Image: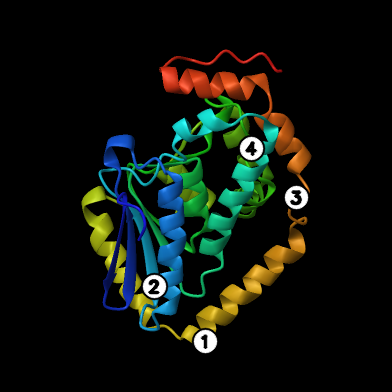
Amino acid sequence: MPSSNLDWDINGSVGVVTFNRPEARNALTWDMYDALVAACETAEAAGDVRVLIIRGAGGAFAAGTDISQFREFADGEAGVAYERRLDAVIDRIEQMSIPTIAEVDGPAVGGGCAIAVACDFRLCSDRASFGVPVARTLGNCLSMANMARMVDLLGVAVTKDLLLSGRLMDAYEAQQRGLATLVLPVDQLGSETVKIAAELSVRAPSTIQATKAMLLRLRDHRRPPAGSADDILRACYGSADFKEGVSAFLEGRKPHFWGV
């Protein structure tokens, strides 16, 4: 894998990706995103890998994209390019022909939340949390595809609640809302994930592949074409609010949003 902050292992029929940047709560660099895609490719190419687990080290799943990378954004067009690149990563996870499990301990925020949502199962510790708090931090927005994934799982009302308020959803609310597949004490999460992965690894690949392929076709029928929200992304990422949000985050202060 091309990133020193992502570990890759194969344990029998189970591939395991571990985000390993705990000092930054596993905030994701582009090297880490690229390494995640490479791990997906490796897992599918290895005919003996039947399940993929994605997890984070150090008590966090992933705290979203590393915000320092947004310093380089000159205008809204950079935001469009960023969201397209992120969409390609998330879509690669969603298109996996084998079952995918997000083992979520701690925060799954922003891009980390999008990765977890794209997985087939979300097995969570009791200290897991989910959300995209950009309304109170950066002032940017989700792509149409990632918003559609949240709506598919949570419905319009809950998606609006999370995105407009910027709050995080704890593990038990996530389970109630249908986002968390299972919630466990933190000391049981790893062993239960291994157990469930082992069970999935002996299920019929023909059924799994057919089911996932049909669900992807249903998804494609419901979603608008790529690029249909580029004007919205361009305006949001090109705003003074977004520039203020990035500066405030990196300077460790609260942002002052003005609506421009």
Residue visible at 35% across and 42% down in the picture? 26
Q: Earlier in the sequence, mark 4 or mark 2?
A: 2
Mark-to-mark CA distance, 1 and 3: 33 Å
Secondary structure beneath dot 2 equals strand
Residue 44 in the image: above or below residue 184:
below
Label 3 belongs to which residue? 227
Q: Position of residue 102 (x, y in %)?
A: 41, 57
The image position of residue 132, as x and y in percent, is 53, 37
Residue 239 pos. (x, y %): 68, 24
Residue at image mark 4: 79
Q: Decide if residue 181 is in sight here.
A: no
Chain-order first, disc 1 or disc 3: 1
Q: Are marks 3 and 2 in contact (CB under 8 Å)?
A: no
Decide if residue 159 is on the left or right side of residue 188. Answer: right
Q: Earlier in the sequence, mark 4 or mark 3?
A: 4
Please name whichever residue, 113 or 86, is drawn nearer the observer in this view of the structure: 86
> Which amino acid, by three-letter code, is at mark 2?
Val
Rendered image quadrant of residue 158: top right
Q: Secondary structure at mark 4?
A: helix
The residue indicated by pointer 1 is 206
Question: Which residue has dot 2 on it?
Answer: 51
